[in-house]
Image (cartoon, rainbow, N blue to C red):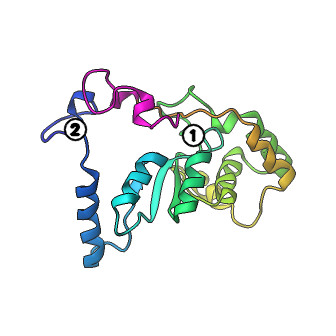
Amino acid sequence: MKKGAAGYKPENLIPADMPSTWRAMEALYDSGMARAIGVSNFSSKKLGDLLDVASVSPAVNQVECHPIWQQTKLREFCNSKGVHLSGWSPLGSPGTWIKGKGDVLNHPVVTLVAKEMGKTPAQVALRWGLQMGHSVLPKSTHEARIRENFDVFDWSIPDDLFTKFSEIEQKRLVRGEYFVHRTLGPFKTVEDLWDGEI
């Protein structure tokens, strides 16, 4: 963001100097001020570009990831490079501004598996992420839901049900249009923002 800029507007964005920014983060890591450093919302291309100049690899790439946006290409790339993938919005952000764009908790595969397993759709979505090998970052302000979200470690989705997740049509819920403008800012299209991973 430009110094003093307010709000996520394309005209307030400036291209990031990732090599310099990463070197500053590596200095924090090297000094012991940070135990690990990572990135968020990096596509395979952006992560690859960073790895080409990094002395310290990112420990994690935190991205939107849930059964409706499984990030298959990015997950495989992260795994091949030793970068942990962490999924934000693993429940699809029910009840937020994303509502209606893709309801993870009401998806037929998620609800079918929940019914078969005697679990809630939220537990199934979280368990799916854990079984995929990444961490999940659910958010709730309700104590009962927080407790429910923790009940995902002593069971697993059996293979016959787990394979059904591969049938889900994929779509990104947070497309990032607010970062895009055809003449202003560094990203001209959504495809440009995500390097074609949309």
Q: In the picture provided, is 193 more to the left or to the right than 101?
A: left
The residue at the far bottom in this view is 32
What residue type is disc 1 on? Gly
Residue 179, by quadrant, is top left
- Residue that label 1 marks: 92
Quadrant that contains the N terminus: top left
- Residue that label 2 marks: 14
**What residue is at 62 percent from the left and 44 percent from the top?**
70
The magenta stretch spans residue 194: yes
Q: Is the magenta stretch mostly helix, strand or loop?
A: loop
Residue 134, by quadrant, is bottom right
Numbered badge on residue 129: none
Q: Is mark 1 on a helix, strand or loop?
A: loop
Contact? badges 1 and 2 (CB < 8 Å): no
Tell which of 126 and 21 is nearer to you. Answer: 21
Instruction: Look at the image and give the residue range highlighted in magenta.
Output: 177-198
Q: Mark 1 Cα within 10 Å, few/some/many (few <14, many 20+)?
A: many
Q: Mark 2 Cα within 10 Å, few/some/many (few <14, many 20+)?
A: some
**What residue is at 56 percent from the left and 37 percent from the top?**
94
The residues tagged by marks 1 and 2 sit, at their Cα atoms, a distance apart of 29 Å
